Image: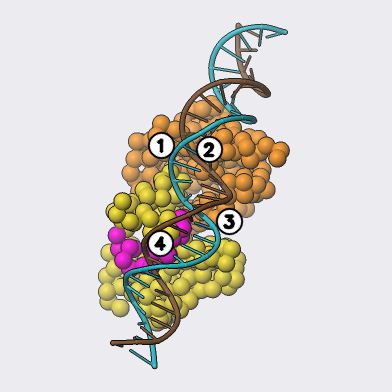
Chain colours: A orange, B yellow, C cyan, D brown
Amino acid sequence: MEELARYLKNYYHLSAAAYDALSACFEEKIFAKNDYLLKEGKICRHLYFLKQGALRGYYNADGKAITHWFGFEDNFVTSFYSFITEKPAVENLQFIEGSIVYAISKERLNGLFNQYHEIERLVRIVYEQYYIRLEERYVNAQFKTAAELYHNLLEQSPHIIGRVPLGYISSYLGITQETLSRIRKPR
Amino acid sequence: MEELARYLKNYYHLSAAAYDALSACFEEKIFAKNDYLLKEGKICRHLYFLKQGALRGYYNADGKAITHWFGFEDNFVTSFYSFITEKPAVENLQFIEGSIVYAISKERLNGLFNQYHEIERLVRIVYEQYYIRLEERYVNAQFKTAAELYHNLLEQSPHIIGRVPLGYISSYLGITQETLSRIRKPR
DNA sequence: GGCGGTATTTGATAATTGTCAAATTTATTG
DNA sequence: CAATAAATTTGACAATTATCAAATACCGCC
């Protein structure tokens, strides 16, 4: 776990003591591709650090799965809505690659918040980052045509394309698979 | 300011000491309708508590002002993107009613974070709430037709309609003013 | 290498929403 | 209470994207 230690210390300026306390609460879990981290209807009571792999969040709408979010290694992930509100999740979190996560319960995390101000700060920063990304996506979705959305994604998040089935990407962009296919076509 | 004290203490469980420190940093400002709290290109270095009134955030896209957000009394407001990243804002914050705000600089806020863990917690909770709201809007925007968006807004946020010009609402919903007008029409 | 299933592409058509221009209603102000 | 400006509605039409159905490409696996 040394790598993680370095990462958290550098990226979030976590002290050794706070890191030790945090990592002592982590439970390592291994998942296969297509496994679920969370199913809709369940309350998400954990924050996860995705050590390796990738996952998606998707909603079921009219029997169709609509992917609205991707998570990749070295990020904190959870169903923020459910985790924050403690209401049942309306989304599913499914691994799209074999993955390793470190889980920490909200209960334990709240305990750490009280002991280590820095850890609450870390989580504040995680929220900030997610807020920013969500806002960017929201603004893009409202202002851009389907083609622009795709080309922006190509530019800004090339790691997503090629690693994720196009059907997931199309719903992520808010368009149908057919429209995405046509956009990708050499014109 | 007693009202504010009660509000923050009840809503965010702020101690008297932390509240005093926070409110001591507040600068009261009064704005007229159509005044700007922030113009695009400027870095937003303050968090604001909107004591009274209402404002909107809008982007300029193709010469058109697209409202993407509303803020009402008793909420913390800012240009989160700019405030968090310390990059120039791409949006404008404009009052849509005469308003009173209490301003606190990011610098002072960071100072308070170090003195009062509770205040950092308060801000974390503010971010949580904004995240949740943004996610709801994002999901709505992707899944709903224009008519559904409007009727949802009518149900969930009736205070917005009637208090805000329809042109702002239409762009908030991601549709044109004409489309909104047709949706509102008795069919 | 061939099989079966999934993912992606293609085609034809329909639905939704946007655009532009103008009319009308509503609000503001001297 | 005009007079003017601003906000909202209406109409005709175009563009974009969705839908449905089917074809093709791709992949893991025996």
- The residue lying toward the viewer, choosing from A126 and B162, is B162
- Total number of numbered labels? 4
* Residue to which mark 1 is pinned: A61
Local crowd at mark 2 within 10 Å, few (<14), some, or many (≥20)?
A: some
Per the image, label 2 sits on a secondary structure element best described as: loop
- Circles 3 and 4 on the same chain: no
Q: Is residue A25 above or below residue A123?
A: above
Magenta segment boundaries in residue numbering:
B158-177
Tell me the amino acid under the disc marked 2: Thr
x and y, in percent, of residue B63 in the image: 57, 67
Q: Nearest to the eye among marks 3 and 1: give it.
A: 1
Q: Are marks 3 and 1 on the same chain?
A: yes
Q: Could you give the CA–CA distance between mark 3 and mark 4, rounded to whole angstroms? A: 42 Å
Label 4, on which residue? B169
Q: Check whether the beta carbons of the residues at disc 3 and disc 1 lie within 8 A of each other.
A: no
The amino acid sitting under disc 4 is Ile
Magenta stretch encompasses residue A157: no
Q: Where's residue B162, x and y in %?
A: 31, 66
